[in-house]
Amino acid sequence: MVEVFRRNLTEVIARSGLSRSAFAARLGLDRSTLSQLLSSANLRLPRAETIAAMAASEQVSVDWLLGLSQEGQLGPDMVRQDLEIAAGAASPADERLLGWHAEAAGYKIRYVPATLPDLLKSEEVIDFEFREQGSQVPQARLQVAEERLAYSRRPETDMEVCCSFQSVECFARGEGIWRTLPIESRRRQIEAMIGLLDELYPTLRWFLFDGLRHYCVPLTIFGPQRVAVYFGNMYVVFNSTEHIRELTKHFDNLIRAAVVQPPEVVGFLNGLLAELNHEDGIRGAAGERHAGA
């Protein structure tokens, strides 16, 4: 904690634009005291009132100074120091999501999708899924999907995706929201996912759990920095270390419970593709019999 405090205090001083002497004077500290706090040989935190004065003077949170929260700057959009709400998830918040991905470069990103993983969706599936939400939404979602896919192709990327195998089966079989999506579109989407998973593994690892035994809301964990929980038209963002740790544990439990491991997902999708081809063959044979009659 002392090391994190020293690093964050150094950042605060740099942002202030003041010399160390001027910064110490603003806080009512001796320059020698500030130098001691910034020394790598120092193994003790300052008194609580000193930390509180620094936080109040520089408009940062005490939790951030001590490394207990990943969000430092206080602002009107903060609901609490460890929680914020980002509205308008179809476009502006998605831009923030891409920024969060960029900030988490080098960390493991862990992702529970609302339907299929965005970066694996085809253009026609994105158009089908979002066209009822406004004319601009599908294009915005397509851009997000393309940028996430481009991000996942970067060599430093490490991404884990987790969802129920039943949700993928529902898509393949045209159930639920996918009921009116043509079988040809579903087939092309599964083929596209197989190709991308072959390309991206092991950088991208997709785990499938049993939805009868486990559940998770759509969320993205950006390493140790933040967790964004998706509510459909907004994200609730958790910044505190404690919340991030607990949600990461929840994701770990989903992975441990996975009944289809990443190397097996392509085989699972090929099985669904065979079902579709068989169904299409039956329909074709029935159509021929009907035409002959």
Image (tube, grey):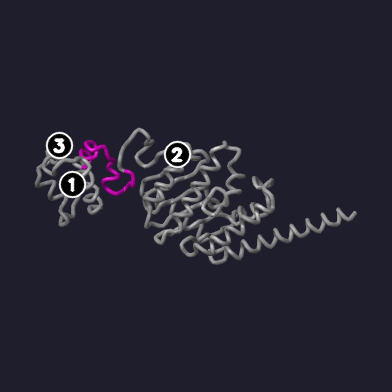
Q: Nearer the viewer, mark 3 or mark 1?
A: 3
Residue 145 x/y as whole percent: 51, 49
The residue lying toward the viewer, choosing from 126 and 236, is: 126
Q: At 57% from the left edge and 58% from the top edge, which residue is drawn?
A: 193
The numbered mark at residue 172 is: none
Mark sitting on residue 92: 2
**Crowd class of label 2 (few under 14; some 14 to 19; many from 20; radius 10 Å):** few
The quarter of the picture where residue 132 lies is top right
Which residue is tagged 1? 46
Vertical position of residue 141 compared to residue 210: above or below? above
* CA gap, disc 1 and disc 2: 40 Å
Left or right placement of residue 291 versus residue 124 in this view: right
> Mark 2 and mark 3: span between their CA atoms?
38 Å
Q: Position of residue 248 (x, y in %)?
A: 43, 54
* 70 within the magenta span: yes
Name the residue rendered at 12%, 38% in the picture. Answer: 25
Secondary structure of the residue carrying numbered label 3: helix
Q: Inspect the image, locate mark 1, and give the three-letter code of the amino acid beneath it.
A: Pro
Q: Which x, y percent locates residue 245?
A: 40, 52
Label 2 element class:
helix
Marks 3 and 1: CB-CB under 8 Å?
A: no
Residue 206 among magenta residues: no
The residue where tag 3 is placed is 26
Depth order, front residue of 274/236: 274
Q: Residue at x 54, y 61 (%)?
A: 197
Please tell me how crowded label 1 is: few (under 14), some (14-19), or many (20+) other residues with Cα within 10 Å.
some
